[in-house]
Image (tube, rainbow, N blue to C red):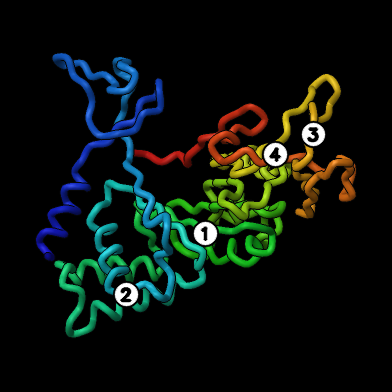
Amino acid sequence: MAEATRAQADKWNKVQFYECSACGRRGAGLDRIGESTFCPECGTHGTSAPARRRVFVNSWSDWLDNEVPIEWLVDLLDRIRRCPNIDFLLLTKRIGNWRARVDAAIECLDDADPADCIVDRDALRTWLESWHAGEASANVWLGATVINQAEADRDVPKLLAVPARVRFLSIEPMLGAIDLSNCFSANALHEIDGGPRIDWIIAGGESGPHARPMHPDWVRSLRDQCEAAGVAFMMKQWGEFAPVPRNEQLGKPAMVWVGDTMIAADGRIQVLDETLGCGIESNAAPMRRIGKKAAGRLLDGVEHNQFPAVTA
């Protein structure tokens, strides 16, 4: 078990990854004709450069949940340590658990019968103790999920306090406006006296049968905050609801339908009935439930796909 796990991690770490500047393709391997290399996706010559592979860890679970077996967490952290050429994106809703869970992982290594997949306990213990002491591994991207201002005020300071090469926020589903200047003693998107900051913002609306709409102005504000601070911004999805198209000449929605949802800036919603009257406020945004796929991910006609800049 231990040797197989070690061999797998070593194999992952050795794979050369490339990114094409012409089409954005990321992957292992290139097409070759003689000494010349070509992108397998678009066929362009000389546009693929070495890049760091990114692995999003456990998108359907939470690595810092107290219910996660500590042996599993120790195994995960050892794989991250053994693969310095791969960037691991660790997202959590429980960023406040980080220090206690790292402490528990270190204690697990000291037990008489630790997880049998750990080959070099001393190396992992040193790695964890260094992280605990403030020296983040170069391949750790640490993210926190927040959905509104209250959660941002609560969790952004905790995220900034954890050592990480890259820190990011996943604001999905976005259920309210978020001003990141309120999240710390200074704007969380800017370095604080040379200290930590948020490097990447991911925003998205809610999907599923009970989804709530995302006000377009909320996500526009995030986009503008990121642009002003030079922070990477990704618009992941609108979710189940998309903004009702506007008539640019009239400066208002082209047409609202019975069943469309009006959402106010404070998150209050109202479904339009046969009267097409809205009792929320005159500038509420009309949203239409058309499904996640049809709603897409364009914000004011632009696809936002930015990632933090890191060297290979």
- Quick check: marks 1 and 3 in contact, CB under 8 Å? no
- Give the spatial CA distance, label 4 vs label 2: 44 Å
Residue that appears at 36% across and 52% down: 88
Say whether disc 4 or disc 1 marks the residue closer to the N-terminus. 1
Q: Depth-wise, is mark 2 or mark 3 nearer the camera?
A: 3
Instruction: Count residues near mark 4 (Cα–Cα under 10 Å), then give few for <14, some for 14-19, many for 20+.
Output: many
**Mark 4 element type:** strand
Rendering coords of residue 265 (x, y %): 79, 49
**Mark 2 element type:** helix
Q: Which amino acid does label 1 sit on?
A: Ala
Residue that appears at 58% across and 46% down: 203
Rendering coords of residue 74 (x, y %): 28, 69
Residue 256 circle label: 3
- In the image shown, does 40 or 137 lie closer to the viewer? 40
- Quick check: marks 2 and 3 in contact, CB under 8 Å? no
Residue 190 circle label: none
Say whether disc 1 or disc 2 marks the residue closer to the N-terminus. 2
Rendering coords of residue 182 (x, y %): 71, 58
Say whether disc 2 or disc 3 marks the residue closer to the N-terminus. 2
- Residue that mark 2 sits on: 70
- In the image shown, does 248 or 199 lie closer to the viewer? 248
- Give the spatial CA distance, label 2 vs label 3: 52 Å
Residue that appears at 38% across and 50% down: 56
Q: What residue type is labelled 4?
A: Arg
**Mark 1 element type:** strand
- Residue that mark 4 sits on: 288
Report if residue 233 is visible in the image.
no
- Quick check: marks 1 and 2 in contact, CB under 8 Å? no
Answer above or below: position of 236 versus 255.
below
Q: Depth-wise, is mark 4 or mark 2 nearer the camera?
A: 4
